[in-house]
Amino acid sequence: MIIGIDVGISTTKIVGLRNGKIVSPMRIRATDPVTSLYGAFGKFLYDNKIELRDICQVMLTGAGSAYVNEPIYGLPTKKADEFLSNGLGARFETQIDEMIVVSMGTGTSYVKCQGNDIQNICGLAMGGGTLQGLSRMLLKTSDIKHVVQLAEKGDESNVNVLIGDITKMPLPGLPLTATASLLGKAHSNATEEDTAIGIIYMVLQTIGSAAILASMGTGIKDIVFIGNLTLLPQCRKVLMPFEELYGVRITIPQYAEFCTAIGAALCYQQ
């Protein structure tokens, strides 16, 4: 078995790859990357009743992997390029050869994949870190589950200016329900629920809009979103309308949050 581990600053994702199949992906949170790495590894072995001798290689990627410079439990350990891992993992999950991979982590990276040519083309300082920071500032919480619960009761039309707010006739290519200005209607007395949905829409729509620009710049019509933000219940509702608006194809894979860890394992095979 090959073990792929995506080491974040506070969250580590781990998967096994055996005979071309994914084994028991899991995610562990901790206060630092080394703790989360070893916690994830130990839990993975214990839950799956795997012995160290069953593992032929450990592949690390992610920002937190910089803190790990020794073999994990004495096993052969290497580091994989994060952008290459994003592309390989997304390709494995979708079977799409030509695509823009949008990895939504603390920030967001955009990777162009054309066959075996996989390269990072740009990045955006907007992502889960932005969502957490704004939630701490405006909602006095960093608990994203609580923010999501609030957002499910909110109404984005109470904080965002929609096309229908500024014209009674749809603009060319833009329905009345399209967003004209993120948070353009927000007031200081906005409810927590409306504030929560406004923050989530702002982060996801900004990331999605940048993905459309990457698509236009490359001519690639398939856009694959991966990373933890794909777990937000609002993710598909916000991103899927881009398909009709801009003539692209949007995919969120089954194991979207684990694609980078999967790709790290695939780097060893490659």
Image (cartoon, helix red, strand yellow):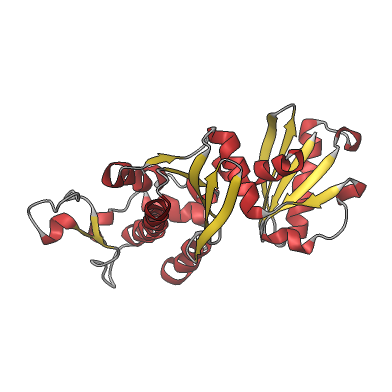
Percent position (x, y) of residue 171?
Answer: 14, 53
Residue at 72% from the left image edge and 62% from the top image edge: 32
Residue at 47% from the left image edge and 63% from the top image edge: 126
**Horizontal side of residue 169 vs 60, given as left or right:** left
Residue at 85% from the left image edge and 36% from the top image edge: 55
Percent position (x, y) of residue 243?
Answer: 33, 42
Answer above or below: position of 149 versus 51: below
Percent position (x, y) of residue 150?
Answer: 39, 54
Q: Is residue 232 visible?
A: yes
Percent position (x, y) of residue 74?
Answer: 92, 48
Quadrant assignment, res 46 = top right
Residue at 20% from the left image edge and 50% from the top image edge: 177
Closest to the observer: 222 or 224?
222
Q: Which quadrant is home to the C terminus?
A: top right
**Horizontal side of residue 7 vs 164, given as left or right:** right
**Horizontal side of residue 184 vs 208, given as left or right:** left
Closest to the observer: 123 or 156?
123
Q: Is residue 258 visible?
A: no
Q: How many marks?
A: 0
Q: Which quadrant is home to the N terminus?
A: top right
Quadrant assignment, res 91 = top right
**Horizontal side of residue 97 vs 68, given as left or right:** left
